[in-house]
Amino acid sequence: MFKSILSIVIVLFFTQVTIAQSVNDTLVFDKNASLDFSNKVSVIPSGELVSYYSFDKLVLADLSSLLLGGTTPSEGIEATFDESKSKIAISGTVYTGDHSLLTVKGDFSATDNGIYFIDENNGSKNAKFSLNYYHSFGGVRSYNKPSSDLDVKRGFYKIEKAKQLKIAQLVKDFYYTTTLLEDAGIPVTSIKIKDINAKQCNAQDCSNSKLVTFNKIIKNFNYTLDVAAIDQTSIMSDTAYITSNKLESKNNNNGFNLIIKDNSETRIVEDEKLSNNLNATYDIDAVINRYEETIASLDSISTKLADLEQKNAQPYWNSKRLFYVGASPFYIREQIKSVYTANQSLSFSDQFIDTKGDLFGVEGQLGFFYESKERRYYTKMIFARASVNIARGSNAAAFNKKTYSFPATPIDTLTSGIISTPNLIQGNLNKNGFDYNYAFTTALGVELFWFTTTHFGLFGQVGYNNQNFDVSQGKDMEIYKLRLGTVINLKNKKKNFATLQLFADRSDLSLSPNSTDKDLRFGFKLGLPFNFTQKL
């Protein structure tokens, strides 16, 4: 079975019947963004379905969805408290990059004096904290060649046309609102358009700085805006713009009449009647708001164009895959209640104390994820992960609960008889006879989830754990674990609402599944160690 699964993974990795995002096809067109809304020619800058900028955003969304369950990671830390203010939970994303995420997660219990770390006496009773760094690589999405698939070719047109319209509309908004405000005496940066290609003029001096920055940004999407070729007069002659953008004057004291003369001179005249269809009355406050919105949109044009690309490209993806690496330093505060420690100088009940310990280490992992819109080679989805853990561990798992009894207390009855009632204490005792101690711990794990359909799959998990104690501090352990089973996505009428794992489990392969060890268990579990909420 393992060999068949491995061969499928290899075939899926090396076989490519459709083109990937990183491979150009034969569609190469003009790279200039047209401001002509009536242009019927598709201007496609390359054979890539989305720009590299958008593709990086898609891979980051895939990584976030896979590991965190959300597709739009935002930086910020969130803290929540319980009603008693004694327990604090924090989580959030500290940093997002082009291919990486840095997240934090923790649960703490606070004392009256606050939260302490690495403090045997005053430390918190329980705490978990981890800093998690993930970096993706090898991200690929495939789609059919536009030269052989008319649907995809039409998709290219829709994507590029949507971006061009967005660019053209923002430029028009910028020119129109800037001109209106400038002529009305409202403080704005003046538009001084000259030939930016002229030798005596550089782009920074000859154009509004916003447009220069805007032009640099859209080059990430393979576009170039020819500022010198923009016809400001034709833009301002569109008197329907004011009505269509709801900028009409609603207050006589706040209205201005815009008159564009035949000689293209633009001026503002108050309380003058409209004389022809080039005139329009507008609300100055509405224009200011539109201008400020436009400036903000110019600054965020990368995000807006990427959103357009991703939305329009969504139907044409056939499959996606990515690799990632992760590193997670962590800290754990653990507590074992009522540990019996023999001390003849104390009363028996005082020999039970709560023991606290501080554990810390780092976990590294390497993961792979693949998903296909259509089933290929009996495969709908694969998730595989290998992990290694190096940490300061403990022998807490060796402690078991036990009921202790100690000398009884005499009690007088109503009939003056005397009876004895034994005192009982629920405590914890190390089955190997050792006190609570630390150990150097290493752990390795490999897991594979293979979905043959959207609703059914198989999985396997193998683990290795090794603990080494100092002499007379504890019993060294070496354990091999195994779990095999099936995965079922349970459905209601609308959507999947739970994932059920049915498994056979071996906690230690050195033990016998039969005889006295009986180390063979069957069970079920809800959930998965990864998320696949963002589907193709």
Image (spheres, helix red, strand yellow):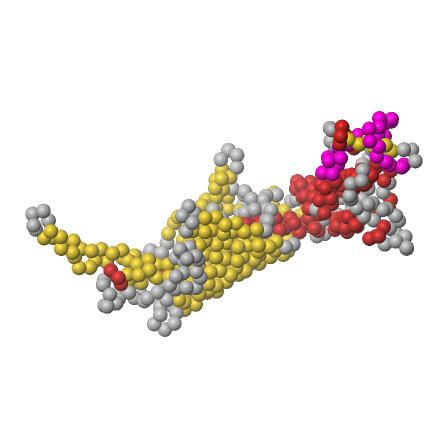
In the foreground, 469 or 373: 469
| 8 with respect to 485 (left or right) | right
Is residue 223 something that shows in the picture? no
Residue shown at the point (54%, 51%) measured from the top left? 77
Relative to 275, say whether 286 is above or below: below
Q: Residue furthest right?
A: 263
The question of residue 445 being in magenta is answered with no
Residue shown at the point (44%, 54%) measured from the top left? 108
**Quadrant of residue 394 in the image?**
bottom left
In the foreground, 462 or 85: 85
Residue shown at the point (73%, 35%) measured from the top left? 286
Q: Please state the extent of the stretch shown in magenta in the rendering.
A: 264-289
Q: Quadrant of the C terminus?
A: top right
Relative to 96, say whether 389 is above or below: below
The question of residue 270 being in magenta is answered with yes
Total label count? 0
Q: Position of residue 86 (x, y in %)?
A: 41, 51
Q: Position of residue 266 (x, y in %)?
A: 87, 36
| 409 with respect to 363 (left or right) | left
Q: Position of residue 248 (x, y in %)?
A: 76, 30
Q: Position of residue 112 (x, y in %)?
A: 40, 55
Q: Residue furthest bottom?
A: 471
| 472 with respect to 322 (left or right) | left
Relative to 227, say whether 239 is above or below: above
Is residue 230 something that shows in the picture? yes
Residue shown at the point (48%, 57%) measured from the top left? 129
